[in-house]
Amino acid sequence: MKSDKKVTVWILTLVRVIIGWHFLYEGIVKLFNQAWSSASFLMESKWLLSGFFHWLAGDSTTLFIVDILNTWGLIIIGLCLFVGVFTRIAGVFGVMLLILYYIASPPFVYSSLPSTSHFYIINYNLIEAFILAGLASLPAGYLWSIQRLFLFYYTKRREERFPVPDNQQKQTEFGTTRRELIKNLAVIPVFGTVFFGMLRKRGWLSFEEKNLAARVDAISSASLISAKKIDIKELKGRVPAGKIKDLEISRLIVGGNLISGFAHARDLIYVSSWMKAYFTDEKVIETLWLCEACGINTAILRTDENTIRILNAYRKRGGKIRWLAQT
């Protein structure tokens, strides 16, 4: 029976660490992705509290606060679960966050947001919520964790100060061996290894920017180009189109690198951030409208959340430009 309990403790500890890493990684990705926003997710809500979610996404200040709370909530909850600190509190807040995700986008309500999986009624959010609820119901210090280690030393010191009579059972149930210490702290090097792997996988800069930062092969300044601005009414004609079977595609297709903030400006790394600042949602929508007016009916754009959010807003206003999804 004792060996069975050890196996159970190990399995549940591993489950807690895995879910913790999932939360933590999701939060870190959102933190370092300047284009990320929860607006598209909130605006897609069509079930309970949909009006509330739409209200959150409709105001820029409120949306900014929601994004911060969501990002740091994921990071803090994930970190606590991963290393094993305040696990019961983290579990409760994790359940609350997952339930909000589920209510905002249940698997039985159609959503235009891309998904690589198929669910009905039960999805990842609901599964993780039930698992976290189970973990949160466990006694403090039941699983291997830093919290268990502190709880052991606290209980040991209390029993030393206030000895328990021989006819009463001591509360200390933890081992005092070096192996016990290693088990409780084993997650620390694991966390470091996984975190290092994440940095290698994602990096803080794009591949192009990292190479440019490592070696500047030229010193250049901004180009001065004098161009005459013309009104769209001065155009002599619309962009011609060709056909692929029954599909008509303009011979000029608008690209999405600049819209997504990829300037490809050689050693001028800062230009990407300028492009992101310039191409606000309204500016992108205005650009797409101008393309339509010129006869450009197709755009090749990325499939990130920022682009999807803008396209949804654009189509709700009647935009008809076709989207070639760039993965």
Image (cartoon, rainbow, N blue to C red):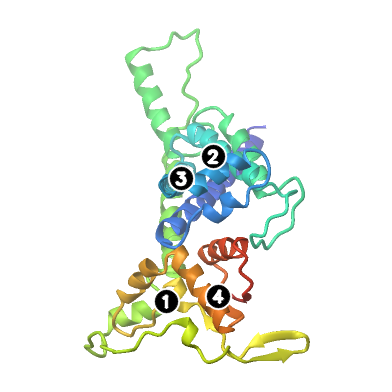
Comparing labels 1 and 2, the label whose residue is closer to the camera: 1
The 10 Å Cα crowd at callout 1, few under 14, some 14 to 19, many 20 or more, is some
**Circle nearer the N terminus (3, 1):** 3
In percent of width and height, residue 14 lies at 57, 47
Task: Look at 62% across and 42% down and name the residue there.
Answer: 50
Q: Is residue 327 above or below residue 247?
A: above
**Circle nearer the N terminus (4, 3):** 3
Disc number placed over residue 66 in the picture, else none: 3
| Residue under label 4 | 301
Instruction: Tell me the amino acid under the disc marked 4.
Output: Leu
Q: CA distance from mark 3 to mark 1?
A: 26 Å
Front residue (pair 319, 204): 319
Q: In the image, 292: left or right of 83?
A: right
Q: Is residue 156 visible?
A: yes
| Residue under label 2 | 94
Helix, strand or loop status at disc 2 = helix
Q: Quadrant of residue 112?
A: bottom right
